[in-house]
Image: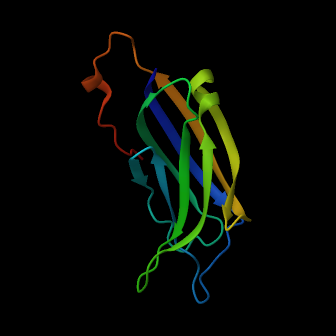
């Protein structure tokens, strides 16, 4: 059993498929680890090249025999209609759980099995101490 804190540094994206016709796209990212979902700020008017530089933290409980993944969904915030999905990425976490950290890395964004741009994130995993009580590291939230 792996326990600890996963920190995700959401850096930027580039080459996104800008779905807005009249204005520049207002992208944001929904980050999901199992049932825990967090949302970045909206990069208003950033178009296809948004920058966030935001850090998110998730508490991790994972069996060593499964394949844990972090899901990223890039959305375009719309005022008068439903937000549009720009694309998605699934980031395998085995390496960061073993190594402790991964430097800023570019991942492909896809939608309908087609390339829709790239997103750059860095990952850090801090294992929980063996004697650390569960309550002492629960309830992490987004920090800027």
Residue 123 falls in which quadrant of the image? top right
Near-viewer residue (44 or 141): 141
Residue at 65% across / 69% down in the picture? 48
Residue visible at 33% across and 37% down?
140
Q: Is residue 72 above or below residue 135?
A: below
Asked whether 13 or 64 is in front, the reply is: 64
| Placement of 117 over or under 37, stated as above or below | below
In the visual, does 7 lie left or right of 130?
right
Q: Position of residue 142 (x, y in %)?
A: 38, 46
Residue most extreme to the bottom: 22
Q: State whether residue 117 is above or below residue 107.
A: below
Query: Where does residue 120 sit, x and y in percent of width and height?
Result: 65, 49
In the picture provided, is 77 more to the left or to the right than 65? left
Residue 12 horizontal side relative to residue 134, left or right: right
Residue 101 placement: quadrant: top right
Residue at the farthest left position: 135
């Amino acid at each position: 059993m792996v326990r600890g804190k996963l920190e995700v540094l959401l850096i930027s994206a580039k080459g996104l498929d800008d779905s807005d016709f009249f204005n520049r796209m207002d992208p944001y990212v929904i980050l999901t680890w199992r049932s825990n979902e967090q949302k970045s700020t909206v990069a208003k008017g950033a178009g296809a090249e948004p920058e966030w530089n935001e850090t998110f933290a998730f508490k991790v409980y994972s069996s060593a025999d499964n394949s844990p993944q972090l899901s990223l969904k890039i959305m375009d915030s719309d005022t008068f209609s439903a937000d549009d999905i720009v694309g998605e990425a699934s980031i395998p976490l085995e390496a960061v759980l073993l190594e402790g950290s991964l430097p800023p890395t570019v991942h492909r964004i896809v939608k309908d099995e087609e390339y829709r741009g790239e997103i750059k994130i860095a990952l850090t995993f801090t294992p929980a101490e063996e004697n650390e009580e569960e309550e002492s590291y629960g309830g992490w939230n987004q920090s800027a």
